Amino acid sequence: MGEGGRRFRSAGSAVVVSLAALLVGVLLNAPGLHKSATIQPEGWKRDVALAVTGPLETVSEALLLDRPRRALKAVLGRSDDDEIDTAVAVPEPATSEPKPPPPPMRETFTPERKLRLWIAGDSLVVVPGESLLRAVGSSPAIEPVGRVDGRIASGLERPDVFNWFTYLREQLRKKRPRAVVVMFGGNDDHGFMTGLPSGTDTGPFGSPTWTAEYRRRVAGVMDSITRSGAFVVWIGLPITEDTEQTRRYDTINAIVQSEAATRPGRVSYLDTYFFFAGDDGGYAQYVSDDSGKLVKMRADDGVHFERAAGDLIAHEVLRRLGQRFDLTS
């Protein structure tokens, strides 16, 4: 065989080895690839990714090639990274017995018995949550139970991305808060839900079937928190630069507000819409403060908040907590 033939065979062997190594690498990481495919936005790209990664994960499990990844995740304390949890675990609504009366108002908290406060939600809660932590930093009667628990791209529509229903129950048992500030819905203005009850489906966003299921999830979150003994302040979604998105947010806000109204003394809905509206009632990135000075309230993406907006929301949250509890004794 000539020198050219040997080179060709060597190159061919290198390609085969490279392809084999690539296949092994894919099989070793198949669980993670399948999880990444699952949490993609609805559409043909997600469908194709699931069609490819599903069989790969099956082969990986059959050949035990998923074991090294699982072992490494366990060592790192991240065993649930590849799990796809779509269970919407919410309390059963009370139907056969009357709703309990509102709890006594103005429960007292002191430096000896502090109000345990937890802040959680999607990425929209981060800035106002940080403002709230700064505001309560000097309060002798309020004790935050950790940092702001804001999860990017999460919500109540897609528990496969992040399962708030499971996580809420875990954290309520662990942290034992008496007041919980939440903000959800920023990523829920779509028509695609996971974790649906078996045999059910939902129509497009805002349809009767979608609304009924989203209402069930909102009510479940409220009941999970209030039945643990905590008071809820639910921050409503703001007006945004995108008019159509604002309309979708209005749909979500209407559901949350109506559910909060059925739980007086236990849930307080904080409407933020007109906090950040301009003189014409529409979206405004800059809003005048009490002195008439224009202050930047909204981030450049037209959705998220700047610190000044977070401070304004935090002030209103504290006012709600002050109405519900005695924090001055």
Image (spheres, rainbow, N blue to C red):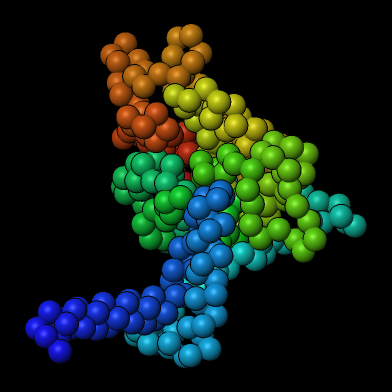
Q: Please name whichever residue, 317 or 282, is drawn nearer the observer in this view of the structure.
A: 282
Indicate the quadrant where residue 256 lies: top right
Position in image of residue 154 (x %, y %): 49, 52
| Left or right: 254 in relation to 9 | right
Is 83 rendered above or below residue 92?
below
Between 258 and 233, the one lying in front of the other is: 258
Q: Is residue 50 left or right of residue 70?
A: right
- The tally of labels here is 0
Q: In this orientation, does residue 58 appear?
A: yes
Q: In the displayed image of the protein, which residue is found farthest to the front?
A: 1
Which residue: 32% across, 77% down?
19
Q: Position of residue 168 (x, y in %)?
A: 55, 62
Where residue 141 sits in the image (x, y, percent)? 41, 52
**Residue positioned 39% across, 29% down in the render:** 302
Residue furthest to the right in view is 96
Left or right placement of residue 280 versus residue 306 in this view: right
Residue at the far top: name it: 280
- The front one of 102 and 210 is 210
Q: Nearer the viewer, residue 136 or 285?
A: 285
**Does 162 appear above or below 211?**
below
Residue 222, can we see it?
no
Q: Residue visible at 31% across and 35% down?
A: 307
Image: 56 above or below 223: below
Give the position of the N terminus as an image quadrant.
bottom left
Residue 240 drawn at (x, y percent) = 47, 27
> Residue at point 34% right, 46% down?
130
